[in-house]
Amino acid sequence: MASNVSASSASASTKASKPEPALDRESIRKNVDRAAQMLDEMLEEVMRDMFVEEAAAYISNAQAGLTEEEAVRRAVVQRLEYMDANFLAALNGYIKAVSAAGSDAAPLTALLLAIREEVMRQVTLRLPPAARALHLLAQEVDKDRRLAVMRAALSGGSGELPASTPDALVSSSTTFIDDMEEQTVVADRRLLARLCLVREEARWLELEAAFNAPSASSASQPGPETTSDDGSAAASGPGSSRPISAAMFVRSNVPQRCAAFIKELVGVADSAARVGLLSRTFSEDWEGAAPRQKPQSADRREQPDWVRPGRFMATLHALTAQLEVDGGEANAAVLKRMRDIHLEAMSVLDKIQRGDIKVPSPGSAK
């Protein structure tokens, strides 16, 4: 996924000199053509290597020493640094075209699929440990399986699962969530919902670890509140219920449309009605979630102004933390409602990532 900096730079350059559609299509065509040439070279190299290996094995009456998997891996590794999204687009196009040819093209289809699998494998291996762990977590639909994988990563990792920390998992998932939600169209809402769940579950595990730590059981008085440079509240000292870490990061500059939607939800007494509102808002870009708000800063003007699940959950955490700082007892009723909304939001996210809630096709906004 592209970084936020890259996305911002692309947006700025587009505003400065927007290319003509024909020129843009021509540029895309050239990029895909270069990627297709690279793919042709890889196919030729793998088939040549396999032919030479099998011919040599036949002549010498010996077992072939090079497998197709090894030949594919060698071809991919040699060119990995030159691959980009255009290569995957060309590869997927080849796979679609060859698959349509039927059983006669089955061997070529299998080879193309092997190349794609190896490309994804090599890319994954080059990700930071937390991102690799997130890649594995994002494949798990079942909550208990995700938590088992997450606990294994927090305990030092095993096999292809690298060691990680709650902070790193939250930070990595936030990067991917923000990247998906800052696009005009959310490409995969089921994946987005699952990433939001992973982030929340990592927060839960950090709170669990903090609660079970020896210092937590011996502390009796809450520590003083401090304020970070960005204005977010962070508890410090023994007995604090919110550990100072990225896992409990609170954004002071919350999306105002999300805040307005949360305010509306707090005013809805019926849980089923709240779930209905959350389900529609999380599954599509719904105009009726909340009134549009004036952007708080110049950079926010460039971002889509929708209530999306990642922003919603971050805003809910921020507002809940602020109410706790302002005085938990005075805001007890509102805090209880917001915690109910959090549980309802988690349930909706789980249904979306499972496919139990239908998600409209990308780009449909109402």
Image (spheres, grey):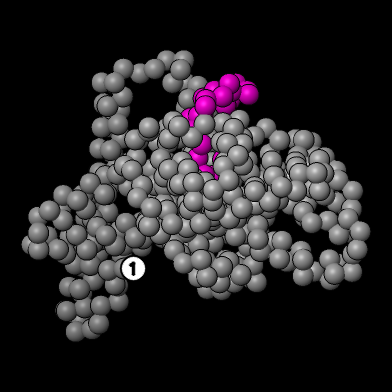
> Does residue 255 appear to the left or right of 246 in the view shown?
left
The one nearer the camera, 260 or 318, is 260
The one nearer the camera, 142 or 267, is 267
Residue visible at 57% across and 36% down in the picture:
264
Q: Which region shows up in magenta?
A: 291-311
Total count of labels: 1
Q: Position of residue 209 (x, y in %)?
A: 73, 66
Residue visible at 27% across and 60% down in the picture:
113
The residue at which mark 1 appears reads as 70
Q: Is residue 80 above or below residue 64?
A: above
Residue visible at 56% across and 24% down in the picture:
293
> Does the image show residue 234?
no
**Split into 4 quadrants, where in the image is the C terminus?**
top left
Q: Main secondary structure of the magenta part?
A: loop
Magenta segment includes 307: yes
The one nearer the camera, 17 or 77, is 17
User: Which image quadrant for residue 260?
Assistant: top right
Q: Position of residue 187 (x, y in %)?
A: 38, 43
User: In the structure shown, which secondary structural element does the residue marked by tag 1 occupy?
Assistant: helix
Q: Position of residue 142 (x, y in %)?
A: 46, 67
Q: Is residue 176 above or below residue 16?
A: below
Q: Is residue 133 above or below residue 227?
A: below
